[in-house]
Image (cartoon, coloured by chain):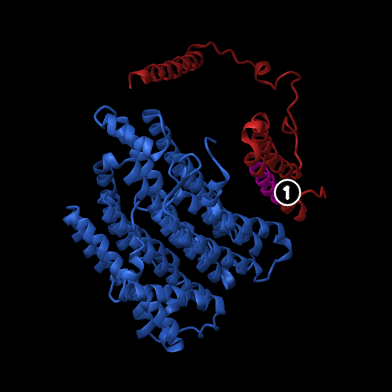
Amino acid sequence: MNGATLSDVALLVPELILVGMSVALIVLARRIKNTPIAATGTVLAALGAGMYSFWAVSEGTQVGFGGMLILDGYSQFFKVLIAATLALVALLSVRSHDLEEVPRGEYHALLLLASTGMMLAVSSLDLLTLYLGLELMTLCSYILVGIAVDRPTSNEAAIKYFLLGSFASALLLYGIALTYGLTGATNYQAVASVITGQGLTENPLLLVAIGLVAAGLAFKIAVVPFHAWAPDAYQGAGAPVAGFLAAGSKAVGLAALGRVSLTAFGEETYVLSLVLAGLAALSIVVGSIVALAQTDMKRLLAYSAIAHAGYALMGLMAGTREGISATMTYAFFYVFMTLGTFGVVIALGERGRTLDGYKGLARQRPGTAALMLLFLLSLTGIPPTGGFVAKFVVILSAVRAGYVGLAVLAVACSVISAFVYMRVAVFMYMREPEEPAPSSFPVAVSAALAVAALVTLIGGISPGILTVWAVSP
Amino acid sequence: MNAYIGIAVSFVLAAGITGLMVILASTLGKKNSTPVKLSPFECGVDPFSLPIGKLAIKFYLTAILFIPFDVELVFLYPWAVLYRQLGTLGLVEMGLFLGILMAGYVYAWDNGALDWQ
């Protein structure tokens, strides 16, 4: 490697913490079968990695490994977000009824490795490092989706996810290859400088390259028409894994797309804007409407996540720094409110699977119902929750970028999605209970729910505390 | 752009000529099928098992375990060639790499992947 020194390793400390814990869990896997050691270790590693990422950037932006990795405010923001996702998912996995037979050591080791891939992807400054990080994330995700080997639905979901995922990886790789063929570089800045020199008119193939890279990343974010895997994968996977994919995978895809669109293809933003605007409009409409027809809770959340991915893209579409900050804000609040909702689904166990299970919950467990209501309000985008702030900033950035029609569509679809989420609330508060009250939750699950609720509320009441960190690259 | 047209043309030519040969042979070729010609090759006895035979499923684990060590060699070889230029950092990195690889090996061993029975 040209010029890689020991000081470059400092850039990788958060990843090394996660890998170290993962390797330790793999070696100890057979000895810690049904103990909470694996979950504890994962949470500790996530806290360590998150805290290091949070403090490290005070020394300023650093580039290392021959310009392949960067440590700046942008990667810091997403690394902390990924660490938070990992910690919350590890806490929620403590007692999940659909992951009971799963070997704990391996499960948490895979979660750690997937998060390592995510961190590499958000800090990469080169298309190849980006691909490497995303592949590490997706390969671990395939196994995580199918980790309940004795459940046929889990296996089916894993195979579907694997087939479509490999296809998307191939698209991304093909886009990278075309970019390299046309510009002779994979480094973002080098690609950008070549594009600035040549312009699009001389290189119509560049359109194809940008389109392929965007399509490959759109698959990770699960936006229409690259969403087909998400509902099946979420439904078949254990609820914590589904939450991990919905929150982490999406945030990373958005982060990668944000950096690529601003740094590498910055000169051709308007091409990417059109593509992203189309994807955003389709996702918002399809996600909101199809969610209406769902009765399985995880499928409902999958379609809701597709709609949210569409909203998040509205920020990137503008192609400006403000737009990317808006998407970062969206990704941040989205992660916490989604994990909160998944947390309630997990906490309710077997009962949380279907929509009917929520009937009369408010009478049996008023606290849980109130938490669920908070997350649902946030997903709808009603103040005073983080979801409102998130939707507000992305719609504002779309209006500023001149996409008024799309902004109107987004607001209209918000109303449709309100119907989706409020249906759950009506079931909880206005129906008679049909099933016995759920048993009390483990402390870890309650803690995760409390953190998610706290961030959602603080974000709604004084968003400035959190959004100040959302600085674009 | 023009530099790539040659490659595209050669692809089209290759596919076209091969396809043409196959189609011509199967349509124009003279077919004189007699019972003797249609009987199984060589001795005329119907085969009673797959020609490759049955393979013990245990080999699949061995094959999977083989892959990491094969890949390890792919990394070790260029590292050995450039050992002096890479210096201490290269040594540390290779140590880390081997350590992580060994963790997988220990895991496989621990879970009984090396027991033949």
Q: Is A347 colored magenta in this rendering? A: no
Where does the magenta region start and end? B93-104
Give the left or right position of residue A320, taking residue A93 as reference. Answer: left
What residue sits right under mark 1 in the picture? B105
Tell me the shade of chain B: red
Give the left or right position of residue A247, taking residue A49 as reference. Answer: left
Q: Position of residue A398 (x, y in %)?
A: 22, 56
Q: Which residue is the extreme one toward the bottom?
A: A363
Q: Residue at x 73, y 48 (%)?
A: B105
Query: Counting other residues with Cα less than 10 Å from the Cα at mark 1, is it few (<14), some (14-19), or many (20 or more)?
Result: some
Q: Amino acid at mark 1?
A: Tyr
Q: Residue at x 76, y 55 (%)?
A: B110
Chain of the residue where label 1 is placed in the rendered structure: B
Q: Position of residue A171 (x, y in %)?
A: 42, 39
- Identify which residue, B49 or B39, lies in the foreground: B49
Above or below for B4 versus B74 = above
Above or below for A430 versus A321 = below
Residue A315's image quarter?
A: bottom left
Q: Is residue A264 visible?
A: yes
Q: Is B94 colored magenta in this rendering? A: yes
The chain coloured blue carries which letter?
A: A
Residue A332's image quarter?
A: bottom left
